[in-house]
Image (tube, coloured by chain):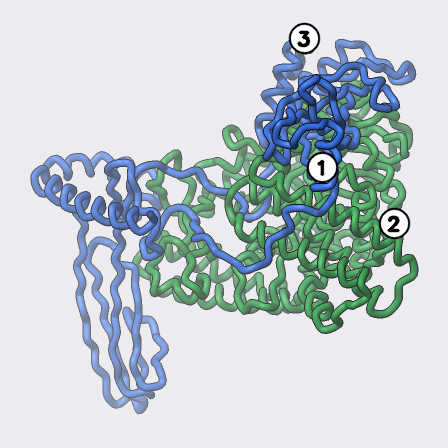
Chain colours: A blue, B green
Amino acid sequence: MKKKKTKIAKKIIKKTVKAVKKKAGAAAGRVIKKVKPAARKAKKTRAARKIAAIMTPRVEVGRDRAEESKYYPRPTPYLPPRQWEHEELPSKYGDTRIVAMTRDPHWIFAYWEVTDDRRMQVEREASASWNDLRKVLRVYDVTGKDFNGSNANRFFDIDINSEAINWYINVGEPNRSWCVDLGAITSSGKFIMIARSNIVSTPRDGASDVIDEEWMSVEEQFLKLYGLWGGFAGASPGKAQIKKIMKERLQQALASGGISSFTRPEKFRGFWMVVNTELIVYGATEPDATVTVQGRPIKLNRDGSFSLRFALPDGEQVIPVKGVSADKAEERTITPIVKKYTR
Amino acid sequence: MEKGYLCIVLHSHLPYVRHPEYEDFLEEDWLYEAITETYIPLISVYNGLVKDGVDFRITMSITPTLCSMLADPLLQDRYVKHLESLIELSAKEVERTRWEPAFNRLALMYQAKFIETRQIFADKYHKNILTAFKEFQDMGKLEIITCNATHGFLPLMEVNPKSVQAQVHVGADNYERFFGRRPRGTWLAECGYYPGVDKYVKEAGVRYFFVDTHAILHASPRPKYGVYAPIFCRSGVAAFGRDFESSKQVWSSIEGYPGDFNYRDFYRDIGFDLDFDYIKPYIQKDGIRINTGMKYYRITGKTDQKEPYNPDWARDSAGAHAGNFVFNRVKQVEYLFDVMGKKPMIVAPYDAELYGHWWYEGPMFLDFLFRKLHYDQKTVKAITPSEYLELNPRNQVSTPSMSSWGYKGYAEHWLDGSNDWIYRHLHKASDRMTELAGTYKDAAGLQRRALNQALRELLLAQSSDWAFIMKTGTVVQYAVKRTKDHILRFTRLYDDIKADRVDEAWLADIESKDNIFPEIDYRVHT
C-alpha cells in the first residue's frame, strides 16, 4: 500500500516538473512580470531583500504529496512506525469485575471482565445460555445514598452487545453519583446482577449553589469574576451566558503537551516541492601548505586534500583558492567562477 | 503600594526516558532539546536578572521524572555528546552559508549559543543544572515545587487510592532528596484533581497545589473571590486557580503571542530541510530525520514560503509583548482590586517547555516581563504562592471541582478510544501492588528490592504521557511499548515475589534500566 503511494507520488512529481517547465517556457515573459512585484515587496524588509535571490523555488500543484521517501526534505517532522518485540498483556485477569471512571460532567466510562465460572453461574440462575441472555448496563443514580442495590434515586438500562468489554455512558447529569451493574435480563424480564462497579461522581458544570455565609458575596460580584473567564471584563454575564462561556473556554486546550514530538504541526495541504543548490569546492595540495578560500583559511585533511560545501544562491560567485607552500616560497591561486540562476 | 499579585508558574515535565540498552534513542532527545532550548535559557534569564539587581519571583515545578533525568550521569554525558555534535554541525553551517548573509548570521548565532550552553552546562554547573535552580531557590527568587511521582493523571486513579497516595508521597520525598527540604507546593499532573486528592497532599506535608479555573469557579461552597484568591480544601491544603486571561494571551493558538510573524518558526529545522548525506551524522543513526534545533526561518505568516529569521525583529516583538502583558495585568489588577476589595492573586501557569522550545523567544519575553514589572510600575507585584499564604493566612474553605487543564477540562484526553484499554491493566497492577504491600510488611534483602522495583514499574506505567501520546497519535508505538514494558515487568515481579523465586540477575537488569527513585519504599503503597 505504502509502496504504491510513493510510486504515484513520484509520478506526480515528474509530471509536475514537466508541467512547470512547459509553463515557464511558454510564458516566460509573464513569469518575470509576476516576479517583479514580489521582489519589490521584499525590499520592505532588509533581510528579505537579500533573501529574495536565494528563496527556494517552490511549486504548488495538486493535492497529493509525497508521503514516504526520507530523501526529500519535508516541512513537517515525520516518524516512520517503529516496532518493538514484547509479550502481549493478558486479555483477562480471571476476575469478575466492573470498574467505573469519570470522564467529564456528562459521561462516565466502565470496563469489565467476566470469568467463565461466573458466566456458568449466571446461565444456571437464568436457565438460559449466555448468548441468549440480554446483556445490559444498569446505571443507578445513587447521589446522597449509601447504595445497597435497591435504594437508588433512579436507574436506566443500556443494552450492550455480548462482545463488549467497555462502554462510554452518557449519564447526562453533572454533580451526581453513579453506580453501574453489569447484568443479564432473562426472557421473563428478571435482572441478574453479574458485577457491580465502584461509585463515581460527575463533576459540577456550573457554579455551586451552596454559599458560605461567612464568605458571602453579592451575586453580581461573583458573576463578574466568573465573566472574566470568558473575557467579559466589566460586565456580569447572565446564567445562560455563563454556560456558554464555560463550554467555549473548555474547548480551547490551553496546554501544549510538552515537547516537540508530542504534537503534530498543522499541515499545509497540497503537493509541495523544494529545490536547493549547493556547491562543492574540493582539491588537494601539499599537506603542509596553507590554503585560503575567498581569503579565509581552511583546514586541510592529513593527505593535503580539502572539500568545502556552500549553499549556492543565485548570482555569481568568485572563489579564489590560494595555496602557499610551507616555506612560503611558492604560491598558486585558482579561481573558479560560478554563475547560478533559477527560473 | 501594590494592588495585587502575579504568580507565574512554569511546569517543567518530561516523562522518564532513559535507555542505556540503546546507543542512540530518539525519545531521549526530548530531554536534550528541552535543556538546550528551555532550561538553560531560563537559567541565563534568571542569572541576568540577579546580576542586574532585578527583584523577581517565579514558581517552577520540576517533576520527579525530570529531576531524576537531569541528575542522571548517563543522560548528562549523553547530553554533552549531543551538544558537541551540535557545535560541530553549527561550525559546518557557518561555512556552508558563507554566501547567504541572512542565514550565515543565524548559523553564527547558533554556534555561539551552543558553545555558551556547553560552558553553562558542563563547566559552570558540572552537568547538573538542578544545582542552578536550587541556587535561585536559595536566593528566594524561585520557588521550586514538585509533582506527583511520574505525572500520573490522578482522577483516573481514583479507584486505587493507594496509588494516588504513592504518587503524591513519592513525588514529595523525591523532591527532598534533590532540594534538601520538603516541597511547599505540588503540581498535580495536568492539574488533574478530584475531591479527596488534597488529603494525600496534606499527608505528604505539602501546603498547596494548582487547579484550572473551573475547579475553583465550580467549587462548593461558591468561592467569594473566584480564582483571584486561593481556597483551602477541608484538609487544610490551599488550591490556587488559573487565571484565564493571562493564560490566553500566551497560550492561544489564535491570539497568543507566540504566533507573531517575527518569531522563529518551530517546524522549519535543518534536520528536515538539508541534504540527506550532509545532515546524516546529526540525525538518527537509522536515518530518521529529526529536529536539530537549528531553525532559520521566522513564522512569516500563514504561508509555507518562510522568510529568514531576524533576531532583532524577534527581540522587538518579545519586548512589545512583555509590555502588553504587563499593561494588561495592571489593568486587570486595578479592576479586580475594585471588585474584590482586596488584592487579587493572578496565577498564570504554563508548560515550561513552551518557553524556548516551542516559543523560542519565550525566555526573552520573561526577561523583559520581570524587568518591566520591576522598573515600570507599582501596581502588580510578582509573588510565589508561599509568600502569598504567609501574607494571607486566612482563606475560604471550599472543595474544588473535579477537573484538569487538558482539552475540554476533564479526563477526556486520557480516557478515549485510543487509550482506554490501558486502565484495566493499570488498575489491576495497582490492586496487586496493594496486595503485595499488605502481604509483605517487612520484607528484606532480595524480596525488598523486588517489591521496591515493582512499585517503580507501576509508577512508570502510570505516567499520563503514555495515554496522552496515544491520543495525539504521535509516537504511539513508543507509548504502547512503555506501557506494556512496565506492566509486564511489574507482573513478572508480582508473580515471582509471590512464588518466592525472584531472579536476581533479571532484577538487577531492570533496576539498572528503570533506575528512578532509588530512595523508594514500597510500603508507601499501603
In this picture, residue A288 sits left or right of residue B515? left
**Alpha-carbon distance for marks 1 and 2?**
35 Å
Question: Do badges 1 and 2 share one subunit?
Answer: no
Find disc 2 in the rendering and name its residue.
B526
**Alpha-carbon distance for marks 3 and 2?**
48 Å
Task: Pick whichever, B26 or A281, lies toward us.
Answer: B26
Q: Position of residue A341 (x, y in %)?
A: 18, 52
Q: Amino acid at mark 1?
A: Met
Q: Relative to B184, is B409 above or below?
A: above
**Alpha-carbon distance for marks 3 and 1?**
57 Å
Question: Do badges 3 and 2 share one subunit?
Answer: no
Q: Position of residue A300 (x, y in %)?
A: 34, 80
- Mark 3 and 2 residues: CB-CB less than 8 Å, in contact? no
Say which quarter of the image contains residue B361.
top right
In this picture, residue B260 sits left or right of residue A75? right
Find disc 1 in the rendering and name its residue.
A120
Q: Secondary structure at mark 3?
A: loop
> Which callout, 3 or 2, points to the residue nearer the camera?
2
Find disc 3 in the rendering and name its residue.
A238
Q: Amino acid at mark 2?
A: Thr
- Dot 3: few (<14), some (14–19), or many (≥20) neighbours within 10 Å? few
What subunit carries mark 3? Answer: A
Residue B378, visible in the rendered structure: no
